[in-house]
Amino acid sequence: MVSTALHEIGVDKLRGVGPSLALKLHKLNLYSVQDLLFHLPLRYIDRTKITAIGGMQPLTEVVIEGEVRASDIVFGGRRSLVCRIQDHSGVVTLRFFHFNQAQQQSLKPGTKLRCFGEVRRGKAGLEMYHPEYQFLDDAKPHALAETLTPIYPATEGVTQPRIRDLCSQALQHLDRHQLPDWLPQELNSSALSYSLTSALRLLHNPPPGTALHLLAEGEHPAQQRLAAEELIAHHLSLLRLRQKVQQQKAPALTPKPAANERFLAQLPFTLTAAQQRVAAEISADISQPIPMLRLVQGDVGSGKTVVAALTAVQAVANGQQAALMAPTEILAEQHRLNFDAWLSPLGIRIAWLTGKLKGKGREVQLAAIADGSAQIIIGTHALFQEGVEFSNLGLTIIDEQHRFGVHQRLTLRKKGSAEGLDKAPSTPHQLIMTATPIPRTLAMSAYADLDCSVIDELPPGRKPIETVVLNELRRNDVIERVRSACANGRQAYWVCTLIEESDVLEAQAAEATADELQLRLSELSVGLIHGRLKPKEKVQIMEAFKAGEIHLLVATTVIEVGVDVPNASLMIIENSERLGLSQLHQLRGRVGRGSESSHCVLLYSAPLSGNGAARLKIMRETNDGFKIAEKDLQIRGPGEVLGTRQTGDMQFRIADLQRDAHLLPEIKRIATALLLNHANHVDPLIARWLGQSEQYAQA
């Protein structure tokens, strides 16, 4: 007789689970017995031993036994029932703020109790608030728990005792039905030293003596076994995605040395060795008839845009269109100006498309995109809206990719998937750029489907930006510093930030700051830019600033990416403690683009939180975006660093990308070996850990 697979046994087959409870379990993504086995405790409490009252320590959870010596209702700030419990070693107070008359009468002096709860310091010594308790009977001794007691993730209507019972039933099913281990022994990894079933049994019912500190940190070998399997499943889902993409056809955009040389010859600068290396890697990719999936990382100011332009030239020279998508209109406009300056001399025609472009102007651009007369198309997310039809899209370039949801990236790629009587199905190459360096651990796990290139060199002549951190009380000194810098022919940014994410409030704050600074610096021309200005107004202000007609530009964080004014050498960021490291680094990168020394002043309001102080300290210590990214990962965690839109459903149940970073090289090896030698294990493993959520990565 063939045993039923555990993922095929629904939770409604368990004792005590009716339709109502089943629906509540579904909210926890618990549909089968296998789901319950992998629904692991958040933490554990130890009820396996009695602690002497005299040996209790504050902020620990303990089981104690003793006799009620006194029981009284006390009226203080709040009415409470206070019981004094004594054993051979000492006395402790039990305090109940919620109680009834029957409870008060049952806790009379002379009653023997076993209590469990957290020990706290109180006015009269150590106390327990609302402990769990049971009455002891000398004739019938009460057995202690034999294993540590698990505390599970739960939801409304699913109590801890209920979910413990269900997990216990699931473990009984594990005795009768086999749980396939999809990681063969010959993979021979230290991370897989525990068997799957042994790891699950231990984590649901840890025996006394199991190292609680290891369980609390997620570092017990049983947890590491499951974390490794989860990371392998995640990695496999991305490799499988990559396989699917690379089974598609892409236009082979062969190198065109003459076009490249014409482009490079009219640039006012020479590419760095790092830019040349990365450009060569991309060129080799797009010359193949399979879709490129490449992520280019480069610190602020490293020159990613010119590498993207060189790639676009190769696409156009092969008769294909290239589309560049940027997250904001300011950044898209900056790209348009750069591409126009670099490519117009070569006779390359550029189209421009944003959400704000309406009417006849929009129709003209759409027609040029559709008939192929526009060879390079630059814009915001408007590029993938309905009604935008490309003639022959061969290359998509996504800038600041973490600002886009994965579905937006996928939609743009699909725009170029040509199908029809006169065209073979084709998928455009995809180049993804970011100036927000991604820590290596995240790149290995979150971008396993992408090849990665790093532009790890700044153009010659760039000087490190000196950063100072000052209390808001020094604001007057900073205003004088702006006056001095502008008197010496330099320009400055003054960035206003607000906690509230409101365009209206941000605009009002920036307007008030601009008025104040214009009043105090009357000899200077002060400009203002924020998110509520019309696109045309933003462009005019940025062009005036670039031309030197504006000395001091007051701005909200709309200038975070893409703004390039070499003469600006001073950046002031107000309320800098409110911003994340990545945003601070991006804003600071607006200066330091010329040959002069540049400075960044981070103004903060006291008191600083621990994280706020840590962020400002790292900004003062380094200009290295990768060091900053690693610190950001430590402070905020992977979900925050990547952005929830980017991670989609990348929510790990057990694994932790920081804690388990040491496993990643091994994970990569095992995942590759599984794909090559055990392909039939891959889909069940992905389904066990990700269910349907691997779809999040399909971009």
Image: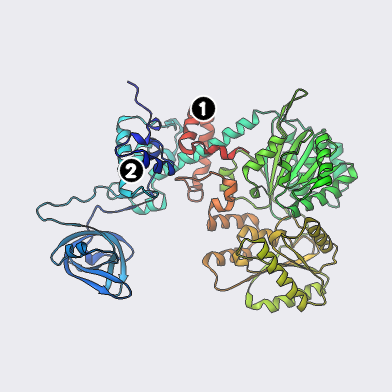
Label 1 belongs to which residue?
Answer: 679
Q: Quadrant of residue 182?
A: top left
Q: Position of residue 139 (x, y in %)?
A: 9, 53
Assign the C terminus to one quadrant of the image.
top right
Question: Is 62 drawn above or below residue 389 in the view shown?
Answer: below
Label 2 crowding class (10 Å Cα cut-off): few <14, some 14-19, many 20+? some
Going from N to C along the chain, the mark reached first, 2 or 1, is 2
Q: Is residue 406 left or right of residue 393?
A: left
Q: Position of residue 532 (x, y in %)?
A: 72, 60
| Residue 409, numbered label | none
Amino acid carrying label 2: it is: Leu
Quick check: can you spot residue 199? Answer: no
In percent of the image, x 39 and y 48: which residue is there? Answer: 154
Of all residues, the one furthest to the left in this rendering is 139
**Alpha carbon distance from label 2 to label 1:** 29 Å
Q: Is residue 691 left or right of residue 360?
A: left
In percent of the image, x 49 and y 36: which residue is there? Answer: 691
Question: Is 406 drawn above or below residue 268 in the view shown?
Answer: above
Q: Is residue 159 left or right of residue 279?
A: left
Q: Position of residue 409 (x, y in %)?
A: 66, 41
Quick check: can you spot residue 496? Answer: yes
Amino acid carrying label 1: it is: Ala
